[in-house]
Amino acid sequence: MLVIAFYRMIKYSRRTNHMVHQILLDPTGTELTFVFKNQFARKMRQDAVERTLMISNLANPPQHGEYRDLVGDLFPEEYPFDYSRIFDYRYFWLKYYISQRNLFAIAKK
């Protein structure tokens, strides 16, 4: 039982390591800068505290066929979205980009 709890804790921490604190838009409107929430832990691991990406790079990676489906509660792609999704038991949305291993965790509230 302890092994299962430890496994789930590690799996959950992989998602929360990508938790976003702020999203800043470049004045030209072409780039977004994502500032991560757990800055102290990221500095201790020598990870970047922020990441800048072109908006065009934020498209979802390929799915289906030879690629596996994206897991988790995915960030809404269309506006207006179903607001009842904010009040479910999951704390954040996952936004995948470039590949299925790159993701951001964005708080729902």
Image: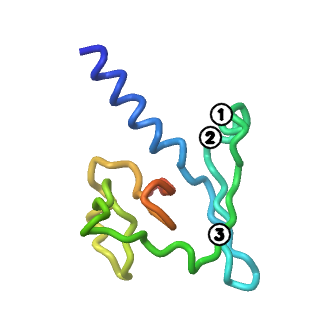
Q: Residue at label 1?
A: 41
Within 10 Å of the Cα at label 2, are there few (<14), some (14-19), or many (20+) other Cα atoms? some
Compared with 4, 64 (above or below) is below
Q: Judge from the rendering whether residue 53 lies leftward or rightward of residue 5; answer left or right.
A: right
Q: Residue at x 29, y 59 (%)?
A: 68
Q: Residue at label 3?
A: 53
Residue 38's tag is: 2
Within 10 Å of the Cα at label 1, are there few (<14), some (14-19), or many (20+) other Cα atoms? few
Closer to us: 58 or 109: 58
What's the CA distance linking mark 1 and mark 3?
22 Å
Q: Amino acid at mark 1?
A: Ala
In percent of width and height, residue 34 lies at: 64, 60
- Residue sitting farthest toward the right: 27
In percent of width and height, residue 15 lies at: 45, 44
Q: Residue at x 73, y 76 (%)?
A: 26
Q: Earlier in the sequence, mark 1 or mark 3?
A: 1
Q: Are marks 2 and 1 in contact (CB under 8 Å)?
A: yes
In percent of width and height, residue 65 lies at: 24, 69
